Amino acid sequence: MKRYTYYIIALLTLLTACGDTEYEYSGYPCNFVFNNSVGQSPALTSATNPNSPGIFCRVTLSGGNYFSFATNQGLSDRVALTAIDKQRTIKIGTYNETGIILGYGNLNNPPVFYAYDSQCPNCFRNTNLPRYQLTMHTDGTAECGSCRRKYDMNNGGIVVDGDGGDKLIRYHANVTGGVISVIN
């Protein structure tokens, strides 16, 4: 009897472990390293402060010579790439087109630092074209102008309005001593 119990438990473990699993982090390459102690972007500073969760900042590459930063609270600026930045391989989002969104969510204590791709994952998946940049809102949501899905950036990028679908594309990220690293 013990032998059958072992086999039943093993079979149940296999069946529950092999379902549709959604990975937390994307497999798309992303490489953004920025020393904000040197660059001093007020927009990025506001989004990378764990004491002010719920502020998110879009990072894009502008003209190949500047990083542009814009928050969901209306603050924006741009910072020239340094010589070190120009030596790095920079990939900000899928196809390096629409950028990434960074910020601390406001639902956990301590707050979780998120890095998302700045485009709608569902429209991108359907077309494989990087032209569906999300619009960020002050309430911590991001909306696609094409499919009208709304995503909660404070809660892992899940769909909170519109048709169901994939959550936001998420990248590995951290902030240490003013250096922001998003490396996938």
Image: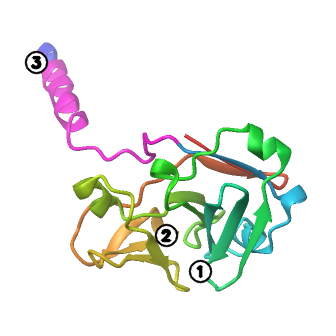
Q: Position of residue 83 (x, y in %)?
A: 84, 44
The residue carrying mark 1 is: 72
Mark earlier in primary sequence (1, 3): 3
Identity, as a three-letter code, of the amino acid under mark 3: Tyr
| Magenta-drawn segment | 4-29
Q: Secondary structure at mark 1?
A: loop
Q: Position of residue 102 (x, y in %)?
A: 61, 63
Which is more toward the observer, 154 or 118? 118
Q: Position of residue 128 (x, y in %)?
A: 29, 52
Q: Is residue 155 left or right of residue 105?
A: left
Farthest-out residue, right: 38
Q: Nearer the viewer, mark 1 or mark 3?
A: 1
Query: In the rendered view, would you say 164 is above or below 136?
Result: above
Say whether residue 16 is magenta: yes
User: Label 3: few (<14), some or many (≥20) within 10 Å?
Assistant: few
Mark earlier in primary sequence (1, 2): 1
Identity, as a three-letter code, of the amino acid under mark 2: Met
Query: In the rendered view, would you say 89 is above or below 124?
Result: above
The residue carrying mark 2 is: 153
Q: Nearer the viewer, mark 1 or mark 2?
A: 1
Which residue is drawn at the image coordinates 43% and 64% (left, top)?
157
Identity, as a three-letter code, of the amino acid under mark 1: Asn
Q: Secondary structure at mark 3?
A: helix
